[in-house]
């Protein structure tokens, strides 16, 4: 890039979807990981040293996702949030509110905002009473050398109310991100007279960024393509939420999305030239910088030491013993054939929900399961989300529709092997959107067309009646229809247990001391083209 006296370079750095990840190791087994804010810090310092005109923005989903962040939110709230402490030290210019920022409730989120030395932006998250942004300004303007003015507007996926507990978003309204961006981008250009506009959007792309074809149901959860196509005046669009790795140009807008958990740092370099009319962007470059092989910043490691000591002590706390085997040795197999860990989660859900029917997921393929001596570490390594428990009343037809949706998780290879459907892997893995059920007997035949795969559906030995009503225990995310389960939206809530599932699991184990591992084989996934057995 030319950087003569009439030109200048502005660099924008972005992190997103850190999900509480700072340290470069796994909380499940202490293995080294190529991720985390400590490694990103090294890259941040390196880029800044080469260009003082650098902006640093976090694009949301910061405070939830690791035991480090869980221990702070639930046990150690008197101290400053560890992620905020890191970001204050690294002198972030702004943060954006992500959907997972609401997981621990408004009190935790507001504490985080107060503790931050940088503003939190979400122009479309407003107070119902006065229609003003709830957590800070809708935008900020940063002025660099030569009076270059950069405007940054923050936006949050408007889909939050579908996932979150009502008490966690009380008094808030989530406006359409595109309509909100239209207003504030125009304001930045016309009123603030900025030279560059950056839109930081905690949301992703609903369409293929090359062809423009829809890649998911157009619900408003992800509006990145719309923002690029419909809003004039955006130079850079930072995206997230989908955990994708993107660095591209869409309708003339430089677009980045840096993966998840600090695996990459997004960098956009803009070259500006000065004319009689002011500064204008004449060149753009964008890339994702991997932390693979990068040394962690020792200052960040040391900063986290007190938090890390408390977290590791909490993780190693024994809570009970297991009689049996609940290790996850093959995640795919645990989704095709009933597994003792999933059976146990059903048991907990039905116990506290007071039901005979339950559905749940194996959230992540890295879930380790339980060993003989169960610790807190194993619980939070398997149940990684701060979901609460809810019982809703559904019809038999709703149940069948939900099973058909789950059955879409699978497809057959050319060799007839059952594998995962691409739509559950891209643009990000969605293993958590495949449910397994207890309290009913069912069979999914993957050789049949989607929507026709439920070949058996019984309860207590008799076919489920489509018009009959059944009470089902599930997590609050699914009960609200999250994960493309519209059949659950608006269903009567029979019981709402406002306690996180991880806590319920811990309590259940500690009250009993020893738990049993086993399965009752109430369901199976088959390919009837090759499986001609007739087992129940």
Image (cartoon, rainbow, N blue to C red):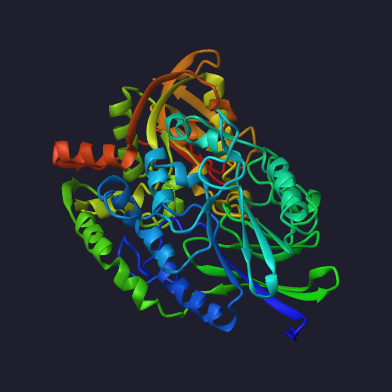
- The answer to whether residue 455 is seen in the rendering is yes
Q: Position of residue 487 (x, y in %)?
A: 57, 26
Q: Horizontal placement of 243 versus 186: left or right?
A: left
Q: Horizontal placement of 72 versus 162: left or right?
A: left
Q: Quadrant of the C terminus?
A: top left
> Residue at 21% across / 52% down in the picture?
375
- The picture quadrant where one finds residue 105 is top left
Q: Nearer the viewer, residue 515 or 4?
A: 4
Placement of 402 over or under 407, stated as above or below: above
Placement of 170 over or under 462, stated as above or below: below
- The answer to whether residue 105 is seen in the rendering is no
Q: Position of residue 316 (x, y in %)?
A: 20, 57
Placement of 360 over or under 364, stated as above or below: above
> Residue at 33% across / 53% down in the picture?
381
Hey, which residue is sitting farthest top in the picture?
468
Q: Position of residue 211 (x, y in %)?
A: 80, 56
> Residue at 51% across / 45% down in the picture?
99
Placement of 333 over or under 130, stated as above or below: below
Q: Horizontal placement of 399 versus 6: left or right?
A: left
Q: Quadrant of the N terminus?
A: bottom right
Q: Position of residue 532 (x, y in %)?
A: 53, 41
Q: Nearer the viewer, residue 481 or 422?
A: 481
Number of numbered discs on residues: 0
Hey, which residue is sitting farthest right in the picture?
276
Hey, which residue is sitting farthest left in the picture?
513
- The picture quadrant where one finds residue 35 is bottom left
């Amino acid at each position: 890039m030319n950087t003569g006296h009439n030109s200048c370079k502005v660099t924008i750095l972005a992190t997103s979807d850190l999900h509480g990840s700072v340290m470069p190791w796994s909380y499940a087994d202490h293995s080294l990981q190529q991720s985390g804010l400590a490694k990103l810090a090294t890259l941040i310092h390196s880029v800044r040293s080469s260009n003082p005109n650098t902006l640093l923005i976090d694009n949301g989903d910061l405070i939830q996702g690791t035991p480090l962040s869980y221990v702070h939110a639930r046990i150690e709230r008197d101290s400053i949030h560890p992620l905020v402490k890191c970001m204050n030290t690294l002198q972030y210019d702004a943060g954006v509110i992500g959907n997972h920022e609401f997981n621990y409730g408004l009190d935790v989120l507001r504490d985080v905002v107060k503790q931050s030395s940088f503003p939190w932006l979400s122009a479309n998250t407003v107070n119902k009473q006065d229609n003003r942004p709830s957590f800070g300004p809708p935008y900020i303007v940063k002025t660099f050398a030569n009076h270059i003015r950069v405007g940054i507007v923050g936006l949050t996926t408007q889909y939050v109310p579908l996932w979150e507990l009502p008490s966690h978003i009380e008094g808030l309204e989530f406006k359409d991100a595109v309509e909100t961006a239209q207003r504030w981008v125009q304001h930045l250009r016309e009123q603030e007279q900025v030279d560059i506009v950056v839109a930081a959007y905690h949301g992703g792309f609903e369409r293929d960024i090359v062809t423009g074809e829809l890649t998911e149901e157009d619900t408003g959860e992800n509006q990145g393509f719309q923002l690029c196509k419909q809003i004039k005046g955006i130079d850079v669009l930072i995206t997230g939420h989908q955990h994708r790795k993107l660095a591209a140009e869409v309708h003339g807008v430089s677009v980045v999305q840096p993966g998840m958990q600090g695996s990459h740092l997004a960098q956009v370099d803009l070259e500006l030239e000065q004319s009689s009319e002011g500064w204008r962007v004449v060149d753009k470059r964008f890339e994702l910088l991997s932390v693979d092989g990068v040394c962690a910043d020792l200052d960040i490691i040391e900063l986290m030491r007190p938090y890390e000591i408390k977290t590791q002590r909490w993780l190693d706390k024994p809570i009970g013993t297991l009689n049996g085997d609940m290790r996850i040795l093959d995640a795919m197999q645990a989704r095709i054939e009933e597994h003792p860990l999933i059976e146990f989660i059903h048991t907990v859900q039905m116990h506290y929900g007071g039901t005979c029917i339950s559905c749940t997921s194996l959230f992540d393929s890295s879930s380790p399961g339980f060993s003989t001596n169960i610790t807190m570490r194993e619980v939070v390594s398997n149940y990684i989300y701060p979901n609460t428990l809810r019982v809703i009343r559904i019809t038999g037809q709703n149940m069948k529709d939900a099973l058909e949706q789950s059955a879409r998780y699978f497809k057959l290879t050319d060799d007839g092997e059952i594998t995962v459907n691409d739509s559950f892997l891209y643009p990000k893995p969605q293993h958590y959107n495949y449910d397994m059920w207890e309290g009913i007997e069912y069979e999914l035949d993957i050789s049949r067309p989607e929507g026709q795969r439920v070949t058996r559906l019984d309860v207590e030995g008799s076919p489920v009646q489509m018009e009959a009503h059944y009470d089902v225990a599930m997590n609050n995310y699914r009960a609200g229809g999250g994960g493309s389960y519209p059949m659950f939206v608006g269903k009567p809530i029979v019981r709402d247990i406002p306690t996180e599932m991880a806590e319920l699991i811990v309590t259940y184990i500690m009250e009993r001391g020893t738990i049993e591992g086993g399965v009752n084989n109430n369901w199976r996934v088959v390919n009837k083209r090759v499986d001609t057995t007739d087992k129940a």
